[in-house]
Image: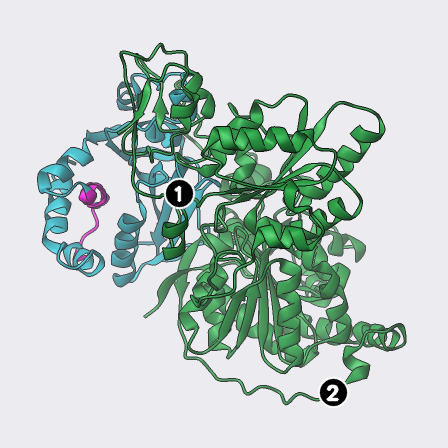
Chain colours: A green, B cyan
């Protein structure tokens, strides 16, 4: 029987069925569940969390060169981190089949930008497949590994949030074991020196011709002729929207392989229809290929270039009609995301928000929510690992110009391991003086609790060596007396450490260590931290309704005729208790 | 049935629309429908609005429900009913759990939880309102709130020929089958 699966589950299933044996990834929405589902098949394959996307792809490249089918998975911005090895891997080609899954996020549901990673396929010359539902996600994963071996190329499997997270029916097959290719040293193929590189470059161009021939004949670039007055070219989930909006009386060219583009097939299709639409999410990727070939079409002049598409948007763009809806004059209040009740970041950000003359450079993780009111304690957020290095640059400028502003850089444990370590080396090496704060909540939080090099466990659930952040900082040259380890839920301790660090003219690190309140605590967590269940309560006789406790932004504290703490959501972290000047909050 | 039917389950992160939608989609698949399901939520782990969208019919393309398309909306929380009403089809039905979860701006005292939501919705669309949590408590386990709402939804869907109780038995925790069936029946009496 067919099973209802998300695209991410289906990709993992496809990899399993295709006899893949090595997978690596760094978690990032909407790609995270691919590797989480891979663990189901751990008897037959190996999978791991890498500290960052570049490492993930390099490990998978190594596995491919060693002869195994391999893959790496990441979110769209992760491919930026992994781009360096990716571009040269396109030159060398593979031994075992290799697929890179890029999960793009049109609409920026959980991302800092909405770049269209189809552009990587053209830039790096990667064979690209674009599934539009879960069945295709599974099939294209398998096909990708096959094509990777057939054309000696890395394959980009380009997913989007809706394909990753929507469930649709998938037919399951058995795993076919794939014998690994016996390793043979091949310097000319795998050592990308300039001399070898020139040969590789030429091979790459020849390879594209072969891939294009395949693209023109393959079944996944599928033509469906109905009435030919109107024709639609589309790919990915945009095809599903277009198919529904244009209906059965329109002709379609659905592209499953979008690099190299099947230009012959496209020309033929375009010549047979009177009016041609290109419906695609984000960039005019398909459209540009058509225009370069002199094919006229209607595309981004009506279909929005940003945000996620849906049937409403496509219908409105093409037919100019709005959906008929029931309107209400009343408006629902927004539900903006906030740090959870009991989140250890709250104590830290509350304390930091009270410090004057500081610029706070932030990073990517739950703690980015420290930028939301009432805390508003983050000034910048650019990319993974960027807080410490951006803070270093800013603080150098302030110092040089004699500006009385100190810089505090905040980063999570997983993000510190991702690329923050390099940044901290920059600070120490170049005599920077920003305060680097590592918010160590003992897990990768935002993406839903994945293990990392600091948690003591691997993706496959085995015990592992743990990075000692304090010693690591010392090893890269940070003075021992400039490293502070604090409990971020203890406001005085945190405030004192911040004051001391801000006073110093050299690099300092504060490690704010407390586990994420939502994580499954390990035995070690229970030993290291007091995690016994507690609740806080407001003594209404003492409460003056000064609302200072509400400045912590805790969602368990509710304002009404009186201020109350919701017992169901309170975890007794005690931050509000320390903030209250009237001693009106007690632990119960 | 060639027409695609659209169901929306809307609520707040942590309310657990997942089990209800899993049971619903399993029943539909067993009866041979093409089914697509999407869960849409923002980036926060808790407290944000969440929707589970189920589309079924002979052949389903888009995995998400468009505005004005939902045949039935089940709102696990009152303000979410208001937020999603523009997705309801003309003549569609809303099943509303009479339950409030204030969001951060309301908790902060910046705005009030909107008053008169039920009256407003009743004046515009066909609604059934009940306190699913209280019914679940009456059944004997407050965690069966999902199943109470599922019962109401399936009754409102008017689909014949699916043995829902068998699907429920298969999907709920062992030892809790009977109480969930009871919750399911109580829920279906609310519509």
Please tell me which residue lies in front, A465 or A501: A501
Question: Please, is residue A421 above or below residue A306 in the view?
Answer: below
**Residue B113 rendering spot, x and y as whole percentages:** 35, 19
Total numbered labels: 2
Is residue A300 at least partly visible in the picture?
no
The secondary structure making up most of the magenta span is helix
Residue visible at 19% across and 41% down? B152
Q: Residue at x 50, y 51 (%)?
A: A444
Q: Nearer the viewer, residue B60 or A533?
A: A533
Q: Give me the disc on residue A379.
A: none
Is residue B165 shown left or right of residue A299?
Answer: left
Q: Quadrant of the N terminus of chain A?
A: bottom left
User: Where is residue B75 shown, x and y percent of the image?
Assistant: 30, 35
Q: Which residues are magenta?
A: B143-163
Q: Nearer the viewer, mark 1 or mark 2?
A: 1
Instruction: List the residue tagged with mark 2.
Output: A185
Q: Is residue A548 above or below residue A91?
A: above
Same subunit, tags 1 and 2: yes
Callout 2 secondary element = loop
Q: Is residue A189 in view? A: yes
Disc 1 sits on a residue from what chain?
A
Quadrant including the C terminus of chain A = top left
Q: CA distance from mark 1 to mark 2?
A: 50 Å
Q: Which residue is mark 1?
A: A517
The residue depicted at 13 percent of the width and 38 percent of the height is B137
Q: Residue furthest front?
A: A481
Q: Is residue A118 magenta?
A: no
Category of crowding for the residue at label 1, using alpha-carbon neighbours closer than 10 angstroms: few (below 14), some (14–19), many (at least 20) = some
């Amino acid at each position: 029987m067919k099973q209802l699966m998300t695209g991410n589950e289906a990709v993992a299933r496809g990899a399993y069925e295709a006899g893949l044996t090595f997978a690596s990834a760094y978690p990032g929405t909407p790609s995270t569940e691919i590797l989480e589902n891979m663990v189901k098949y751990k008897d037959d394959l190996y999978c791991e969390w890498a500290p960052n996307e570049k490492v993930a792809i390099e490990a998978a490249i190594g596995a491919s060169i060693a002869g195994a089918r391999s893959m790496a998975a990441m979110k769209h911005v992760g491919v930026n981190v992994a781009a360096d090895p990716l571009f040269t891997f396109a030159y060398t080609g593979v031994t075992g089949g290799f697929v890179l899954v890029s999960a793009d996020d049109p609409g920026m549901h959980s991302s800092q930008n909405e770049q269209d990673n189809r552009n990587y396929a053209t830039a790096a010359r990667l064979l690209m497949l674009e599934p539009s539902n879960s069945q295709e996600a599974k099939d294209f994963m398998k096909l990708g590994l096959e094509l990777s071996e057939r054309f000696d190329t890395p394959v980009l499997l380009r997913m989007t949030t809706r394909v990753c997270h929507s469930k649709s029916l998938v037919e399951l097959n058995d795993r076919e074991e794939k014998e690994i290719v016996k390793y043979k040293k091949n310097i000319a193929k795998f050592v990308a020196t300039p001399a070898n590189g020139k040969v590789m470059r030429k091979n790459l161009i020849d390879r594209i011709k072969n891939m294009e021939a395949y693209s023109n004949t393959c079944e996944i670039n599928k033509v469906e002729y109905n009435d030919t007055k109107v024709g639609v070219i589309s790919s990915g989930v945009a095809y599903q929207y277009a198919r529904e909006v244009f209906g059965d009386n329109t002709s379609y060219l659905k592209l499953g392989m979008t690099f190299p583009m099947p230009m012959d097939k496209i020309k033929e299709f375009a010549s047979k229809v009177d009016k041609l639409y290109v419906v695609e999410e984000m960039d005019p990727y398909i459209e540009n290929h058509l225009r370069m070939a002199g094919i006229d079409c209607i595309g981004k002049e009506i279909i929005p270039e940003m945000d996620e598409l849906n049937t409403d948007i496509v219908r409105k763009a093409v037919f100019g009609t709005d959906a008929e809806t029931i309107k209400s004059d009343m408006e629902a209040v927004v539900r903006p995301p906030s740090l959870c009740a009991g989140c250890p970041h709250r104590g830290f950000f509350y304390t930091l928000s009270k410090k004057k003359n500081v610029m706070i450079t932030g990073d990517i993780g739950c703690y980015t929510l420290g930028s939301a009111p009432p805390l508003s304690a983050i000034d910048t957020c650019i990319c993974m690992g960027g807080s410490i290095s951006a803070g270093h640059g800013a603080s150098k400028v302030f110092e040089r110009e004699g500006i009385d502003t100190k810089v505090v850089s905040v980063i999570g444990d997983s993000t510190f391991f991702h690329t923050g370590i390099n940044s901290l080396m920059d600070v120490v090496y170049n005599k920077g003086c920003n305060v680097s704060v590592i918010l160590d909540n003992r897990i990768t939080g935002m993406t839903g609790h994945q293990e990392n090099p600091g948690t003591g466990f691997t993706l496959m659930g085995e015990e592992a060596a743990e990075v000692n952040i304090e010693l690591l900082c010392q090893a890269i040259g940070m003075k021992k007396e400039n490293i502070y380890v604090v409990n971020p839920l203890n406001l005085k301790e945190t405030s004192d450490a911040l004051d001391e660090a801000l006073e110093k003219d050299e690099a300092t690190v504060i490690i704010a260590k407390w586990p994420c309140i939502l994580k499954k605590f390990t035995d070690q967590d229970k030993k290291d931290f007091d995690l016994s269940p507690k609740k806080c309560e407001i003594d209404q006789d003492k409460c003056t309704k000064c609302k200072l406790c509400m400045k912590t932004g805790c969602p368990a504290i509710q304002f009404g005729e009186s201020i109350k703490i919701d017992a169901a959501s309170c975890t007794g972290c005690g931050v509000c208790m320390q903030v209250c000047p009237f001693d009106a909050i007690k632990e119960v | 049935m060639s027409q695609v039917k659209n169901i929306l389950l809307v609520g707040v992160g942590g309310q657990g629309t997942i089990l209800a939608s899993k049971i619903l989609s399993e029943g539909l698949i067993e009866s041979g429908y093409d089914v697509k399901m999407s869960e849409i939520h923002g980036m926060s782990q808790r407290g944000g609005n969440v929707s589970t969208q189920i589309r079924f019919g002979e052949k389903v393309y888009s995995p998400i429900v468009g505005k004005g398309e939902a045949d039935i909306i089940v709102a696990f929380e009152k303000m979410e009913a208001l937020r999603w009403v523009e997705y309801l089809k003309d003549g569609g039905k809303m099943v509303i759990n009479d339950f409030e979860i204030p969001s951060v701006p309301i908790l902060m005292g910046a705005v009030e939880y909107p008053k008169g939501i039920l009256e407003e919705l009743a004046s515009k669309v066909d609604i059934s309102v009940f306190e699913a949590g209280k019914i679940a408590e009456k059944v004997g386990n407050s965690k069966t709130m999902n199943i109470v709402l599922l019962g109401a939804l399936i009754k409102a869907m008017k689909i014949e020929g699916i043995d829902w109780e068998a699907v429920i038995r298969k999907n709920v925790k062992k030892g809790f089958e009977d109480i969930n069936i009871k919750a399911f029946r109580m829920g279906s009496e609310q519509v």
